[in-house]
Amino acid sequence: MRILGIESSSLVASVAIYEDGITMAEYTVDFKMTHSQTLLPMIDEMVKLVGIDLNTIDAIAISGGPGSFTGLRIGLAAVKGLAFPRETLCAPVSTLE
């Protein structure tokens, strides 16, 4: 199973691709820009570097809080936008885990 993980609950934004027990790629940034400016470009660059298509993602995991309300909202909106047209499974994961 190929999983896209997104962390947007704090000042640092992270995305990762995990497949069959192996972290294939991870991208973390601590820019002064908001997650609305960084998350989707990070995902795009990461999948290009790894050479996969977003249509091959089986599930998307997103930080579900606690954390920054705005950061969580941006992350959830990005996941909905990525998952809905592809009918991809989504799951929130506690930020504390």
Image: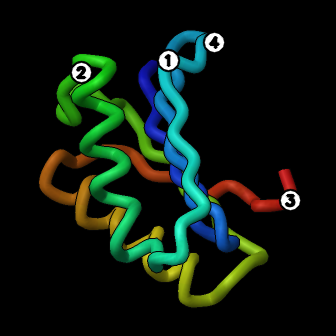
Q: Are marks 1 and 4 in contact (CB under 8 Å)?
A: no
Q: Do the residues labelled 3 and 1 touch (CB within 8 Å)?
A: no
Q: As shown in the figure, which amino acid type bears the numbered disc 4?
A: Gly
Residue 48 at x, y percent in the picture: 23, 28
Q: Residue lying furthest left in this view? A: 85
Q: Residue lying furthest right in this view? A: 96
Does dot 4 land on a helix, a strand or a loop? loop
Q: Are marks 1 and 2 in contact (CB under 8 Å)?
A: yes
Instruction: Tell me what residue is drawn at x 57 percent, y 77 percent.
Output: 72
Does dot 2 land on a helix, a strand or a loop? loop
Task: In this rendered view, identify the residue nearer to me: 1 or 28.
Answer: 28
Q: As shown in the figure, which amino acid type bears the numbered disc 2?
A: Ile
Q: Classify 68 as above or below 97.
A: below
Q: As shown in the figure, which amino acid type bears the numbered disc 3?
A: Leu
Q: Mark 3 points at which residue?
A: 96
Mark 2 burial class by Cα count in 10 Å: few <14, some 14-19, many 20+ = few
- N-terminal of the two: label 2 or label 4? 4
Q: Name the residue under label 2.
A: 52
Q: In which quadrant of the rendered view does residue 64 lie?
A: bottom right
Is 51 positioned to the left or the right of 30 in the image? left
Report the disc number at residue 24: 1
Q: Are marks 2 and 4 in contact (CB under 8 Å)?
A: no
